[in-house]
Image (cartoon, coloured by chain):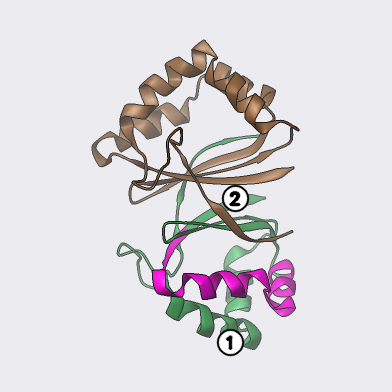
Chain colours: A green, B brown
Amino acid sequence: MKRYGQVIRVKPERYEEYRRYHQEVWPEIIELGRQCNIRNQTIFHRDGLLFRYFEYTGDDYEADMARAAVDPKNQAWWEIMQPMQEPLESCVEGEWWASMEELVHTD
Amino acid sequence: MKRYGQVIRVKPERYEEYRRYHQEVWPEIIELGRQCNIRNQTIFHRDGLLFRYFEYTGDDYEADMARAAVDPKNQAWWEIMQPMQEPLESCVEGEWWASMEELVHTD
């Protein structure tokens, strides 16, 4: 299992809408996450910052993420979410949620 | 079990030092976390933002945090860490790491 932390901004004027969508995430999106070996996933918010934590239990992260990226329902979801979000300035090409570095872990 | 997400800034000029301390966290600090029912804790970094995720397995969070706060070794640790950190402007009194709101969770 590998832990992931990611960060992105949510546009202040879209935050309430973003929150409502996440109170009723489409079942297909949740199911796709499971199929792609994402577990124990949580998204947190404060002051326009979104933090996403999850654990990846598969053995080919790139392949699973590529699979998620071409899923039509997931693309429809992203099409709604992305205009509400604002990636960090330091994001590199292909990054949307910015990968964070794990500094420390305790069990 | 309850999940917690917290955010704080690290001063850019202190980041390397902060990282080094967390590569060798004092054993007493790790042990104290366990005694205070903190599990699966990870601190992530990107662009001066620190994100802390953990799971609390006890039944009195306030009491456990109060116990941690008076621990001399923990106080010594905070005395080193806090000058490297910068709380969010929106923090209320008594807050250091800023509590985040859980928007969504999937297992």
Task: Give the chain letter at badge 1.
Answer: A
Q: Are marks 2 and 1 in contact (CB under 8 Å)?
A: no
Asked if residue A100 lies left or right of residue B3, the reply is left
Q: Is residue A76 above or below residue A36?
A: below
| Of the pair B20 and A53, the residue shown nearer to us | A53
Residue at 63% x, 88% y: name it.
Answer: A72
Please, what is the dominant secondary structure of the magenta stretch?
A: helix
Q: Which residue is mark 2?
A: A3
The N terminus of chain B sits in image quarter? top right
Helix, strand or loop at disc 2?
A: strand
Q: How far across and down, in percent of the image, does residue B65 sit?
A: 60, 27
Task: Give the chain letter at badge 2.
Answer: A
**Residues in magenta?**
A7-35
Residue sitting at the far front = B93
Q: Amino acid at mark 2?
A: Arg
Observer able to see residue A86: no
The C terminus of chain B sits in image quarter? bottom right
Q: Which mark is residue A76?
A: 1
Asked if residue B104 lies left or right of residue B50, the reply is right
Between the C-alphas of marks 2 and 1, the distance is: 26 Å
